[in-house]
């Protein structure tokens, strides 16, 4: 049973014409700043307050009652959703990733979809940096040892990490977040930056001295390999046993993009076989990760529960950007962060 909170603002009249308020459905509680902005524009807002994701049926039923949807969670919007929501006018995502939305189905149904790019790059790159450093020093494992009463004293040969100074950081998908990580890694550890994209990132080459390499070279040369490409049919399970076999045994794999880019079964086997030094994951497949997943028990693995953009500042800005996108659609304007530009043609 879904639990919704409905906030009805009083619709108002300006001097000349009646104001028509719109019905907005928010799929998960978002920072209050975003809600306040929508409310101050006088619209009726329904919020799914529970931590539990909506079932497909609940999502469709709630969205059918509304004209505009703001997605604050990890809901899926597939072709079936768009077919069954004829009153829907726009979908605003409070995320930069949109692998959970069938964009071509949205476009076919004339639904503009927007996201929140850029404003979360610094916070997400911080988490990639945190994982890179935490894995290199086995930080989570050592913390667990204290909790388990296994800290018996100083030992000059146990629990040694590896340093990052002057090492090579390989970035798979050097876009906004990859750029921020590369900038931090160069400044902190003078790391050499190599990257693989489908097209060259000239700004990263100019500003950071990043070098474009082919995928195979990225695998072979990276001391730390950080994944930042979107999850698509092309990138799905790109990091599998074949990829791990080509990486250095001393390499660290970091994934803050989407769990689906990594074959977790193969990653577990590669770590058990000592083919990699370790792995840091902010995203898993599936999410949430089961507490009995063998990766959680490994001394060279650090896992976080998808907290890339989870800072007060970033989440406030994401909520405001998502609300502003929706308000633009309600005014009949182009959504500023539109994904499916074609919908306006
Ligand atoms: P972005 O600026 O679009 O960067 C993505 C990069 O990936 C682009 O440079 C793109 O370059 C490259 N790319 C795309 N397809 C590729 C392919 N097949 N092979 C190699 N490179 C490819 O996106 P962003 O803002 O940095 O965000 C990246 C992803 O991070 C998002 O899609 C999202 O899934 C994830 N994310 C996670 C969190 C979190 O909480 N952990 C937070 C925010 C974002 P080309 O087009 O030239 O290939």
Image (tube, rainbow, N blue to C red):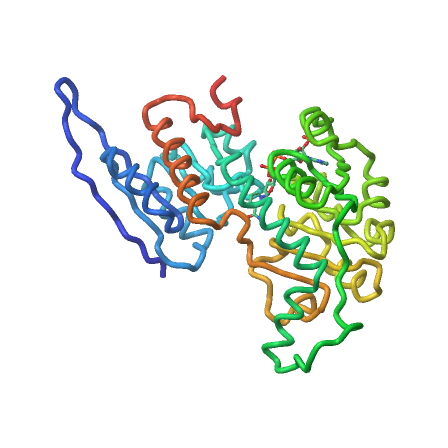
Direction from residue 269 to residue 87 in the image, left or right: left
Query: Could you tell whether 113 is left or right of 87 in the image?
Result: right
Residue 284: image location, x then y, percent = 63, 56
Query: In the rendered view of the protein, which quadrant contains the N terminus?
Result: bottom left
In the rendered image, residue 48, in percent from the top left (x then y), is placed at 35, 52
Q: Is residue 173 above or below residue 263?
A: above
Q: Residue at x 16, y 38 (%)?
A: 10
Across the whole image, how many numbered discs are drawn on residues?
0
Rendered position, 217 above or below 337: below
Residue 259: image x %, image y %? Answer: 64, 52
Residue at left offset 37%, top offset 58%: 50
The residue positioned 37% from the left and 45% from the top of the image is: 26
In screen coordinates, is 206 left or right of 102?
right
Q: Nearer the viewer, residue 209 or 345?
A: 209
Splitting the image into four quadrants, where does ligand 1 fall? top right
Residue 75 percent location from the top left of the image = 48, 48
């Amino acid at each position: 049973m879904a639990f919704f909170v409905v906030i009805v603002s009083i619709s108002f009249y300006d001097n000349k014409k009646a104001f028509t308020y719109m019905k907005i459905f928010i799929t998960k509680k978002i920072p209050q700043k975003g809600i306040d902005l929508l409310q101050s524009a006088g619209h009726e807002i329904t919020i799914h307050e529970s931590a539990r994701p909506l079932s497909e049926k609940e999502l469709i039923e709630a969205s059918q009652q509304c004209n505009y949807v703001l997605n604050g969670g990890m809901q899926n919007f597939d072709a079936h959703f768009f077919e069954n929501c004829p009153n829907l006018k726009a979908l605003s995502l409070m995320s930069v990733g949109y692998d959970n939305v069938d964009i071509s189905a949205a476009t076919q149904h004339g639904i503009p979809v927007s996201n929140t790019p850029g404003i979360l790059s610094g916070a997400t790159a911080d988490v990639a940096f945190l994982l890179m450093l935490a894995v290199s020093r086995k930080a989570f494992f050592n913390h667990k040892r204290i909790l388990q009463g296994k800290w018996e004293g100083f030992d000059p040969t146990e629990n040694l990490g590896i340093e990052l100074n002057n090492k090579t950081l390989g970035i798979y998908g050097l876009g906004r977040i990859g750029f921020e990580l590369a900038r931090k890694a160069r400044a902190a550890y003078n790391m050499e930056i190599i990257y693989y994209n489908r097209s060259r990132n000239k700004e990263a080459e100019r500003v950071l001295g990043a070098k474009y390499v082919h995928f195979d070279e990225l695998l072979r040369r990276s001391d730390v390999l950080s994944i930042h490409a979107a999850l698509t049919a092309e990138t799905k399970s790109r990091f599998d046993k074949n990829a791990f076999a080509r990486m250095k045994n001393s390499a660290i794999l970091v994934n803050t993009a989407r769990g689906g880019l990594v074959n977790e079964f193969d990653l577990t086997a590669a770590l058990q076989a000592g083919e990699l030094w370790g792995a840091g994951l902010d995203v898993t497949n599936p999410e949430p990760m089961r507490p009995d997943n063998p990766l959680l028990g490994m001394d060279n693995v650090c896992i976080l529960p998808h907290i890339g953009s989870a800072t007060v500042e970033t989440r406030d800005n994401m909520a405001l950007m998502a609300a502003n996108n929706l308000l633009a659609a309600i005014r009949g304007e182009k959504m500023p962060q539109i994904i499916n530009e074609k919908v306006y043609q």
